[in-house]
Image (cartoon, rainbow, N blue to C red):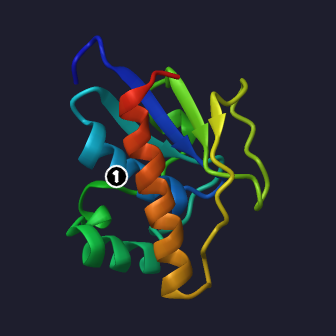
Amino acid sequence: MLKNRKKVAFICVHNSCRSQIAEALGKKYLSDIYDCYSAGTETKPQINQDAVRLMKKLYGIDMEETQYSKLLKDIPEPDIAISMGCNVGCPFIGRGFDDNWGLDDPSGKSDEEYTKVIKEIEERVCSMRHFSL
C-alpha cells in the first residue's frame, strides 16, 4: 500500500455481493491509484455464491481467495465511501457517502441480472480512473 493513494470503500449492508464485486474489480482496474476495500454494517458467513461463480467466469477472479465479508471497523478508514445502493436499507457509516451508485441487489435473480449489475459496477469502477471524488 502506497501512502499517497486514497482508500476507497464500497459499502452495502451485508457486504456479500455488490460491494464484494466492486472491491474485486477495483483491485483489478484501480490498484495502481487506489486501495480498494468493501465492508458492510452486517456480515454474511460467505460471499454470495452466484457472484463468486460469475466473477470467476467473467474475469477469472476468485473473490473467495482474497476477500471475505467484513464490517466497517475491519477496514482502514476510507477517504472515499461509495454506497452500492440502498434498496435493501442504507447503512449508516458515521458520515455521508461520497457517491451512491444506486445499484439493484441481484441476489436471488437470474445470471442475466447478475451480469447486468456486474457490468454496471465495472463501468463505474473504471470511470473512477478519470476523475477524483
Give the residue type at disc 1.
Leu
* Residue 16 appears in the picture as rendered: no
Rendered position, 91 above or below 34: below
**Residue designated by label 1:** 25
Q: How crowded is mark 1: few (under 14 residues within 10 Å), some or many (20 or more)?
A: many
Residue 23 x/y as whole percent: 40, 48
Left or right: 88 with respect to 116? right
Residue 11, quarter of picture = top right
Residue at figure coordinates x 67%, y 65% from the top left: 104
Q: Please name whichever residue, 63 or 83, is drawn nearer the observer in this view of the structure.
A: 83
Left or right: 87 with respect to 33? right
* Residue 25 appears in the picture as rendered: yes
Could you tell me how many numbered marks the image carries?
1
Q: Please name whichever residue, 26 or 132, is drawn nearer the observer in this view of the structure.
A: 132
Residue 6 x/y as whole percent: 39, 20
Residue 50 x/y as whole percent: 45, 80
Seen as rendered, the residue at the extreme bottom is: 110
Residue at figure coordinates x 46%, y 75% from the top left: 115
Residue at figure coordinates x 42%, y 34% from the top left: 128
Rendered position, 30 above or below 110: above
- Helix, strand or loop at mark 1: helix
Seen as rendered, the residue at the extreme top is: 4
